[in-house]
Amino acid sequence: MIGAGLIGLAIAFELAERGATVRVYDRGEPARAASWAGAGMLAPYTERVADEVLLDFCAASLREYPPFVDRVRAAGGMDPRLRLDGVVHAAFNQADLERLQHGARELVAREVATEILDRASLLSVEPWLGSQVAGGVIVSGEGCVDNRRLGRALVSACQTRGVLVERSSAMHVECNERRVLGVHTDLGFVAAGAIVNAGGAWASQLQGIPPSCVPPIVPIKGEMLALGAPVDFVRHATWVPGAYLVPRDDGRLLVGATVESAGFDERVTARGVHELLHAALSSAPSLGSFAVTESWAGLRPGTPDGLPFLGPTPIAGLFLACGHYRNGILLAPATARALADAIENKIGPELQSFSIERRTEESSPSRITRM
Ligand code: GLY
């Protein structure tokens, strides 16, 4: 496995539970890139994933989250704090409210449990939203996981199942014209029957891969910050215009996230912080008295058509699990299951749309719109 983010670790864990011998290599600390930087939102309908096949895959992964977390907790002894108690959307004017209500009716028609909340009901759910709020919607089965805890839980679960998680400053895949042979790391050559490129925003930089198997991944920067708020001040992951707020049970209130093509720049900028605070405080001035306790940036792995690259490549034994863009944390369970199936040669139609064979030069990295 190349890449010790949540995707790489989840696949490694799944394979190890199925009896495989697995090693994971990463240039950095496990689960410290986008896996650490995200807010852990599990919200395919809120994210309005436009591609129907990807939406189905996201929905499957959301359903798979509770048993996945149970297995990780049982193996590693650490609770990643999964909460599927709904994602709230708040509107502050009539036009936005009607747009939310229209989106909610569409979700109900798809049998996605969604409730329209009038102003009073919304304020009883989230009193901090304050006097300007017009009403909103709650998408009931969505939620969030503490992605930093999930990273640590997965490392522990992997180690318990015998997975070696190692750092290597460089990784170079060796393959002939037909199949992979292994990978060169700082610790020497390791022969492998299967190699998975789960390199996140850096997946296109993996050395030794023929051009036909290099995924066209682009980094899409996201800046975030945390406020120190009383526990339960904000009760649900909540979207307000221009920002989302995700409460953690240690009192941190995450505010995210900017979306920017800035190469591999991971600086927190004045503009990014301003954008987030402006959006959050315009909707909820009551947040203004809280301390800013943390700020950070991460790189989402974007793709030209907004779809991930998952499954086999023209080189036998070389697999891709990258390009999850805004949904990497959500897609960890389904990706782990589907990739483990593919490696075991049990390939169904599920991954067809995500094949490297579809490579496209379309320019937009996103087919995702907000609700
Ligand atoms: N999934 C939320 C984000 O990428 O900002």
Image (cartoon, grey):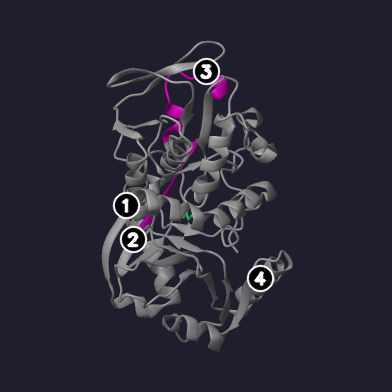
Q: Which mark is residue 268?
A: 1
Q: Under tag 1, what secondary structure?
A: loop
**In which quadrant of the rendered image does the N terminus lie?**
top left
The relative height of residue 102 versus residue 317 in the rendered view (above or below) is below
Q: Earlier in the sequence, mark 4 or mark 3?
A: 4
Q: Which residue is mark 4?
A: 104
Q: Which residues are magenta?
A: 202-225
Q: Which residue is mark 2?
A: 225
Give me the residue at 41% from left, 53% from top: 38
Q: Earlier in the sequence, mark 1 or mark 3?
A: 3
The relative height of residue 109 versus residue 152 in the rendered view (above or below) is below
CA neighbours of label 4 inside 10 A, class few (<14), some (14 to 19), many (20+): many
Q: Position of residue 105 (x, y in %)?
A: 70, 71
Residue 214 seen in the figure: no
- Left or right: 113 with respect to 122? right
Label 1, label 2: how far apart the Cα atoms are: 9 Å
Q: Under tag 4, what secondary structure?
A: helix
Q: Which residue is mark 3?
A: 210
CA neighbours of label 1 inside 10 A, class few (<14), some (14 to 19), many (20+): some
| Labelled pair 4, 3 in contact (Cβ < 8 Å) | no
Label 4, label 3: how far apart the Cα atoms are: 45 Å
CA neighbours of label 3 inside 10 A, class few (<14), some (14 to 19), many (20+): few
Give me the residue at 70% from left, 66% from top: 111
Based on the picture, tell me whether residue 78 belongs to the magenta stretch: no
Q: Which mark is residue 183?
A: none
Q: Earlier in the sequence, mark 4 or mark 2?
A: 4
Q: Amino acid at mark 3?
A: Pro
Q: Earlier in the sequence, mark 2 or mark 3?
A: 3
Q: Residue furthest top?
A: 176
Q: Position of residue 155 (x, y in %)?
A: 34, 44
Q: Earlier in the sequence, mark 1 or mark 2?
A: 2
Q: Under tag 3, what secondary structure?
A: loop
